[in-house]
Each structure stands twice: as C-alpha cells, then as structure tokens.
Image (tube, rainbow, N blue to C red):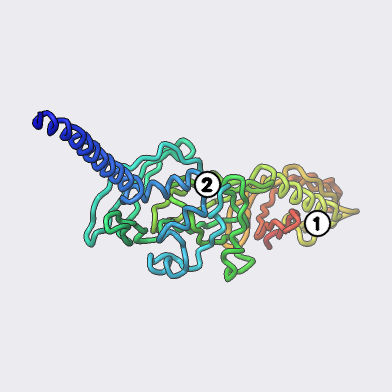
Amino acid sequence: MSGDGSGTRMRPALLWSGIGILLVVSFLAALGAVQRAFYSPSGFVTAYVEALAAHDLGAALSMPGADPTPAALKQAQLPEDASHELLRSDVLPRLTDISVRSDRELSGGEHRVTVHALADGRPVTAAFTVRPAASVLGVLTTWEFASVPLTVARITVAHADTFTIGAHTVYPRAAAPDQPSSAFSVAADYLLFAPGRYELGHSSRYLHADPAVVSGSPGRSTEAVVDAEPTDAFTQAVQTQLNGFLDDCAKQQVLQPAGCPFGVEIDDRVQGMPSWTMVTYPAVHLTAGATTWTMDQAVGVAHLSVTVQSLFDGTVRQRESDEKFAVSLSSVTIRPDGSLDIVVAD
C-alpha cells in the first residue's frame, strides 16, 4: 500500500517539474527573441530604419547617437553647420523591404550592420556602426550609434538660385549666407537620412536641370551638382529682346547706327537718308559664363539702301547691299521679377 502512495505523490511532482522546465525554456526563448529584436546590433539598426520607413523622424532621431548635434557632427568629421532643412518627412523616400544583410563585429565590441532596402522602388544599402551602451538586468545589451547615422550632402546649384527635392523647393543661399548674393553658383551642406535615394533638380520658366541623384552613406559626406541650363523659353526671350534691339538700330537713318553692331563706311557722297532693314537676325545660343549667361559671336545680315554720288565722275546710283555683322552678349541676367537684363558686348 505504501508503494502505491509514493507513486501517486511523485506524479504531481514530475508534472510540476516538467511545467517548470517548459517555463524556463519558454522564458529563455522569449528572452532570446527579445534580445535579437531589441537588444542586438541588428535589432537596433532595424528599429532605426523602420522608424524612417514610418516617417517617424522624432523616434529615429531620439535613438542613442542619432541626434546630429554640432558636437556629434564634429566628432564624425562632418560640417558642424550643415543645414537640417531636409530632415523632414516629405523629403524622405518610401522605404520598403528592409533587411539586414550582415552584422560584422569590429574591434572594441563595435558592430558594422549593413541594411538593404528599396527607396521608392530602387535598391539602396547603408552600413551603420554601433557600439554597446549599457545593459538591462545585466543580460540584455543596449546599443548606440558610434557615429551620427546621417549623411551630409554638399549640394551645388549652378546657374540658379533654387533646387527641388521631392515637392520641396530649397533656397541654398539661406544655408550659405556667407556666399555673395551675386554668385552665379551657390553651394551648401545639408543633412540627409540614410539609407535613401534623393533626386534633386530645378525647373522654372527659363532654366531646367536634369535630375542629380544623391545616395549617401551614414557618417559620410557626398556631393551633388544641380546644373541648370537654359530652356527654349529663355533662349526665345533673349532672341526677342535682341531682335528688338537690332530693329531699333535699323531705325537710325545713318550709315553707322550709334551703339549698334552693324554699319558701313562710304567714300562717295551720300544723298538723302540711308535706310536699314534686318534680313537675318543672329541666332541666340546661351552659354554659362563666370558670373552670368553669355553669348559668343553670332552672325546676322542687315540690308542697306542708300543713294550715293560718285566723287570721281558725279554719277548717281542707288546702292542696295546686304551687310554681314557679328554680335555677342557679354551678360544676360534673370532679374528677381523674371525680366531680363541683357548687355550687348562692345
């Protein structure tokens, strides 16, 4: 009878022991899952990139080591005065398919975590360096960025005052106040999130730039040039003003219109008033100069009609001649109100 009682008492003990073991295993498994998801280098970096994907910039920048303070930028050997203007949700690309490609341990306990994603459907990769920060319960390690995880793009806008990024228009002179207001090109430093792929451009009535793509690396600098070129509307507007200038020249009833690129000298005696008409206007072709738009020499033709008397034999004849001439523009400037200031070269 006593043997049967002992067996009866052992079964609950074994049951509770089994449950205890299962609870310990479950706890360790859960602890491992938590560690991988939240307390590992890969989990830390993934949380950062997922915050960017959710356009939760506050959460991303509040992660340890992510805030681009002047001290953090200096430590990363990045420009301390880089503009924060582009750290905004309407500039961020749409990040999808986020995955960790590698997690490599470096010296001193740091880790190099490489993340791959799609930015607006295009593949991008970024490598982040993180280091241990502290521990929870002496078991779970917390992490921080070893270097600010942003990139600095030095953006140069050539021949224009603005550039576009997404639906946002940026005035780089605001981020580079020391550059002369008359400068034909302007450059400024901007902070951007990584990973990402950003298209910069310019589009206005008179100027257009093909897209310039920026894909920066965390903690590094990159450069991009937005090269604005004349539109057909710009060329046509200059052509119209040049034609008007030449028409005014043709109204002067003299052999050599003052301040004009065409004229002739005649040794015989002129009778009556010479008459000029334009035959061919010089075709405008604009190029970027050092400080403004310019135009190299272009050829036109003006027709002269004048009555002359020979000093040799006194005969009188009507002279009709096409006179070729060349004209160049030393400066073509777009004023703030959109009008043009054109200077014809001497």
Q: Quadrant of the N terminus?
A: top left
Residue 106: % across, % down: 23, 56
Residue 112: % across, % down: 29, 52
Residue farthest toward the front in the current orientation of the protein: 1
Q: Hey, what amino acid is under mark 2?
A: His
**Residue at figure coordinates x 82%, y 49% from the top left:** 276
Determine whether the residue tagged by mark 1 lies in a helix, strand or loop. loop
**Residue at figure coordinates x 40%, y 40% from the top left:** 98
Q: Hey, what amino acid is under mark 1?
A: Leu
Residue 323 located left or right of residue 43: right
Residue 68 located left or right of residue 276: left
How many C-alpha atoms fall within 10 Å of the one at disc 1: few (<14), some, or many (≥20)?
A: some
List the residue tagged with mark 1: 255
What count of labels does the image hold?
Answer: 2
**Residue at figure coordinates x 66%, y 42% from the top left:** 232
The foreground one among 337 and 327 is 337
Determine whether the residue tagged by mark 2 lies in a helix, strand or loop. loop
List the residue tagged with mark 2: 55
Among numbered discs 2 and 1, the one appearing first in the sequence: 2
Residue 316: % across, % down: 86, 49
Picture quadrant where residue 110 is located: bottom left
The foreground one among 319 and 279 is 279
The foreground one among 325 and 88 is 88
Residue 147 seen by the camera: yes
Residue farthest toward the right in the current orientation of the protein: 272
Residue 167: % across, % down: 61, 45
Q: Quadrant of the C terminus?
A: bottom right
Q: Nearer the viewer, mark 2 or mark 1?
A: 2
**Residue at figure coordinates x 38%, y 65% from the top left:** 76
